[in-house]
Image (cartoon, rainbow, N blue to C red):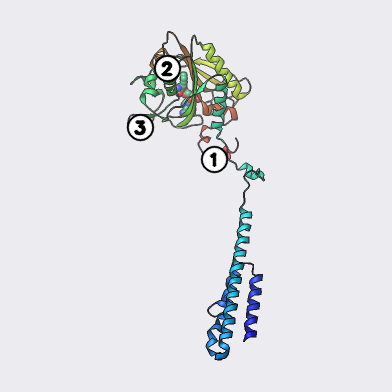
Amino acid sequence: MEHQLAEIRATALSAIQSADSIDILEEIRIQYLGRKGSLTLILRSLGNIPAERRASIGKLSNQYKNEIESGLEDKKNELSKTIGSDLLRKQLIDVTLDSESATERENLGRLHPISQIQYEIEDIFTSMGFEILDGPEVETDYYNFEALNMPRHHPARDMQDTFWTEDGNLLRTHTSAIQIRGMEKVSPPFRIVGPGRVFRYESTDASHENTFYQVEGMMVDREITVAHLIFVMKQLLKEIFQRDVAVRLRPGYFPFVEPGFELDIHCLICDGAGCSVCKQSGWVELLPCGLVHPNVLRMGGINPEEWSGFAFGLGLNRLVMMKYGINDIRHFLSGDIRFLKQF
Ligand code: FA5
């Protein structure tokens, strides 16, 4: 019997030593110490052994049982550590390492083309001494219309189809509301730009969206003239396109400027030949502007006898379209990854 027990101990301990997984350890435990395990069966049959040998066989069996149990426990700890560190090694990420594959770099997120150009425009204007201001997308009638020389029932309100909220507010139809908010914040002389998202209740086509972006600009100082306005507009376009682009200035009506202009850009999609973006005219309406109406200055608490200014409202989507040759404004909000990946 002692011989049989010694053999069980030796084979069990050697199997434990060479086990390379926790599952195998469990199989060994069952084989020797399970309900029908070889050592368990011996322990259970102790009653059949002659009394004079029972105590010593019993003691030996329990000693081997303890040795096998602690062998199993030690091996289990050892295996858990190696498995854990293998797993860690596999999952370890060194955040300081550059991505290895070109595909991973390809899949990195990037700024939307509108944001890219917006930040570029902000840099151009801050380099000319302009301050960047913000305003809310849900506006009051006062800031969007009334203070801009468009009192209730003014027919010019119809030029901008408006989303009204049930409480009488609206989704701002243009960034010009930032002119009024700006005059409340800063006093003349000042130069401000206000980029932002605007909304119009319009049906869409290649050059019209119901949700688009504008950049408002306003400069108030003494004796500001149309010459200042044209200089700043040309400077902006030159920096954005990195070359001279053909523009035309024609009279335009906006109640908040006098005189008012439409500054159109030669269509860079069709090079002036006519396409759906320029509505076959060869020109794209991009940058309405003018000298700030005295009533607007008064609404902002500024004396028009002392101060004058210019303002403009750049259509950001159309500018980005001209810069990159995008032939349909609806791509911007389409969420099509193939479109976005190109910028
Ligand atoms: C305005 O919104 C005036 N607030 C601009 C202004 C500011 C004039 C300061 C004078 C002084 P208008 O509605 O034309 O004007 O829009 C300005 C520009 O926004 C347009 O030239 C065009 O580039 C762009 N735009 C207008 N409607 C849409 C539209 N539905 N989809 C995309 N771009 C549009």
Q: Marks 1 and 3, Cα distance to the nearest angstrom?
A: 30 Å
**Mark 1: few/some/many CA within 10 Å (<14, 14-19, 20+):** few
In this view, the residue in front, 262 or 222, is: 222
Q: Marks 2 and 3, Cα distance to the nearest angstrom?
A: 24 Å
- At horizontal 45% and vertical 11% (from top left) the residue drawn is 307
Q: Which residue is mark 1?
A: 336
Residue 214 placement (x, y as % from top left): 49, 26
Circle 3 SS class: loop
Q: Earlier in the sequence, mark 1 or mark 3?
A: 3
Mark 2 close to ligand 1, CB under 8 Å: yes
In this view, the residue in front, 121 or 154, is: 121
Residue 235 placement (x, y as % from top left): 58, 18
Quadrant housing the C terminus: top right
Quadrant housing the N terminus: bottom right
Residue 261 placement (x, y as % from top left): 49, 16
Q: Earlier in the sequence, mark 2 or mark 1?
A: 2
Q: Which residue is mark 2?
A: 256
State yes or no: discs 1 and 3 in contact (Cβ < 8 Å): no
Q: Which residue is mark 3?
A: 165
- Check disc 3 and give the amino acid type: Thr
Closest to the camera, between mark 1 and mark 3, is 3
Closest to the camera, between mark 2 and mark 1, is 2
- Check disc 2 and give the amino acid type: Phe
Q: Is residue 295 visible?
A: yes
Q: Is residue 269 visible?
A: no
